[in-house]
Amino acid sequence: MENEIKQIISDVSKVAMTEVHEDAELGNDLAIDSLDLLDVVTELEKKYQIDIPAEDMTDFITVKDIITAVQNTVKSNE
């Protein structure tokens, strides 16, 4: 799951997969703006059939934040 999430982030941000690591900051390191983040979240929601509330997106600072949120949401839906 973690690599799939990183791949989606890489695809949306057009940043090489090697640059998408857990500690990478979305804005500073990957140049992901709010519209890109919305695209990432939309792709993740489709892939995992989950709903990530918009207010949670404001807490996404690093790649790890997104991974954790998706994993927690998927677990809670099981």
Image (spheres, rainbow, N blue to C red):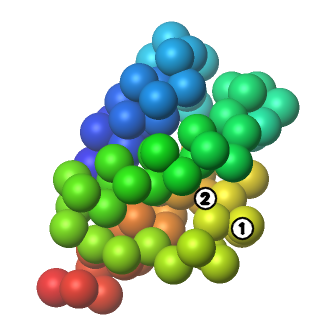
Q: Residues within 10 Å of mark 1 (few under 14, many from 20)?
A: few
Whether tag 1 and tag 2 are in contact, CB under 8 A, the answer is yes
Q: Which residue is mark 1?
A: 59
Q: Nearer the viewer, mark 1 or mark 2?
A: 1
Residue 16 vs 35, above or below: the answer is above
Q: Residues within 10 Å of mark 2 (few under 14, many from 20)?
A: some
Q: Residue at x 46, y 18 (%)?
A: 17
**x, y (%) of residue 53?**
51, 78
Q: Secondary structure at mark 1?
A: loop
Residue 8 vs 18, above or below: the answer is below
**x, y (%) of residue 54?**
58, 73
**x, y (%) of residue 33?**
71, 39
Q: Residue at x 47, y 45 (%)?
A: 39
Q: Would residue 67 be seen by someone viewing this image from the given angle?
A: yes
Q: Secondary structure at mark 2?
A: helix
Nearer to me, 76 or 13: 13
- Residue type at mark 2 is Asp
Which numbered marker is on residue 65?
A: 2
- Residue type at mark 1 is Asp
Task: Measure the C-alpha gap from mark 1 to mark 2.
Answer: 7 Å
**x, y (%) of residue 37?**
59, 47
Which of the 4 image quadrants contains residue 8?
top left
